[in-house]
Image (tube, rainbow, N blue to C red):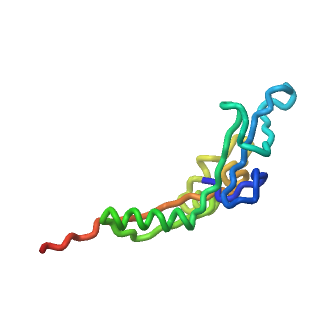
Amino acid sequence: DFDFLPGKISDAVNSPVVAQKIADDLSRRGESRDMDTYLVDQGTADIFFPTDFGLLEHIYTEIMREAGLSVRSTNSERHPNFFSTFNVSKATVTLNGEDPLEKDYKNMQVFTASTCVLPTRNK
C-alpha cells in the first residue's frame, strides 16, 4: 500500500489524494489531475489514503494478542526491496525492460507478519 502520497488535499496526518480522470480532452485521455477536495461527484475520482505502517504493525500485534495468537515477526518493506528479496522482479518486467513495481511505486510498502497459536493453560 502507499506509505506517502504527494499532492494531498491538506496537511492533516494521512490526508488523502483525490485524483480525477481527465475525460474532456482526448489528447490527455488516461491522465488524471489532483483535486483540492474530496467533495467531487460520485464515481468521478479515485481517493487514495496513505497507510501508517508503524501504526498498522502495532494494531495487528494487539489484535493477534487479543485473539490468543503470538506475533513472531512483522515487517514492512519498500516495493523494490520486497520484490528483489522474493525474486519476483523477473515476472514484473515489461516488454521494454522496465519494472514498474520498482520504478513507479517507490512510495509503496508491503506488510508481512508471522503468527503462532499460544499454548493454553490447563486449570
* Residue 99 seen in render: no
Q: In the image, is 120 to the left or to the right of 6?
A: left
Q: Quadrant of the C terminus?
A: bottom left
Outermost residue toward the left in this view: 123
* Residue 113 seen in render: yes
- Foreground: 20 or 86? 20
Q: In the image, is 65 to the left or to the right of 34?
A: left
- Foreground: 1 or 105? 1
Q: Residue at x 39, y 69 (%)?
A: 71
Percent x, y for residue 43? 66, 31
Percent x, y for residue 72? 39, 71
Q: Residue at x 58, y 64 (%)?
A: 77
Instruction: Indicate whether 70 appears above or below 26.
Output: below
Instruction: Indicate whether 17 appears above or below 40.
Output: below
Question: How many numbered marks are there?
Answer: 0
Q: Residue at x 80, y 40 (%)?
A: 33
Q: In the image, is 25 to the left or to the right of 3?
A: right
User: Which image quadrant is residue 45 in?
Assistant: top right
Q: In the image, is 3 to the left or to the right of 121?
A: right
